Image (tube, rainbow, N blue to C red):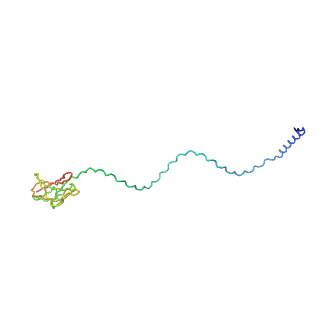
């Protein structure tokens, strides 16, 4: 073991104190602050954060303008024909008598005694039906009036115009001219008075 002498220890302590004093004496005042260094480069991008909660629904937009009409669709198939309707009411059959030379004479028609020739105009008869004209006397006897000219059947609209004559001379009195037509639904008749003076 190395043993320091008493004088050496004193010398060492004295040197240490001297060095400390020299260090303190040599320390100068603080210098001025240096200028700031340049900005450092940006750091690396961080990891993507987790998705946030869904936001509330936005308000509805305004109504759009009316669009152009579409093209016409294809025509549908024709429906089934419906059942035939009931037969409508028929117009009552009528006849008008007039003198053969004057179709616009007053009613009832008045003619002179003797063989009478009269014009008969009818309407409301079955279309296309054949008709006959008869003369009824006050005592109930009848005569078939001969057709001189004109229609022999009613038109499809149920009208006709014909000229008929009495087969014998008529005496003064009131007669009835009756026109009857035959149809599938039954006979149709109409009458008008005839005055013989």
Most foreground residue, 30 or 20? 20
Left or right of 4 on screen, residue 74: left
Viewport quadrant of the C terminus: bottom left
Q: Position of residue 23 (x, y in %)?
A: 83, 45
- Where is 55 relative to 193, above or below? above
Left or right of 156 on screen, residue 60: right
- Which image quadrant for residue 135? bottom left
Left or right of 76 on screen, residue 177: left
Viewport quadrant of the N terminus: top right
Q: Position of residue 145 (x, y in %)?
A: 13, 57
Most foreground residue, 152 or 24? 152
Give the number of callouts: 0
Most foreground residue, 156 or 124? 156
- Which image quadrant for residue 177? bottom left
Q: Position of residue 148 (x, y in %)?
A: 15, 60
Q: Position of residue 151 (x, y in %)?
A: 18, 59
Q: Residue furthest bottom?
A: 101
């Amino acid at each position: 073991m190395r043993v320091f002498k008493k004088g050496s220890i004193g010398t060492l302590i004295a040197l240490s104190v001297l060095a400390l004093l020299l260090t303190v004496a040599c320390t100068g005042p603080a210098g001025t602050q240096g200028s700031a260094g340049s900005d450092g480069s940006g750091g690396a991008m961080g990891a993507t954060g987790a998705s946030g909660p869904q936001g509330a629904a936005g308000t509805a937009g305004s109504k759009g303008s009316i669009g152009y009409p579409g093209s016409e669709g294809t025509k549908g198939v024709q429906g089934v024909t419906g059942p035939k309707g009931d037969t409508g009411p028929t117009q009552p059959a009528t006849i008008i008598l007039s003198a053969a030379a004057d179709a616009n004479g007053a009613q009832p028609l008045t003619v002179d005694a003797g063989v009478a020739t009269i014009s008969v105009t009818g309407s409301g008869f079955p279309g296309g039906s054949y008709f006959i004209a008869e003369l009824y006397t006050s005592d109930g006897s009848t005569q078939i009036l001969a057709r001189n000219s004109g229609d022999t059947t009613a038109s499809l609209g149920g009208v006709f115009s014909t000229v008929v004559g009495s087969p014998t001379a008529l005496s003064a009195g009131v007669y009835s001219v009756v026109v009857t037509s035959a149809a599938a639904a039954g006979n149709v008749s109409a009458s008008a008075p005839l005055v013989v003076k």
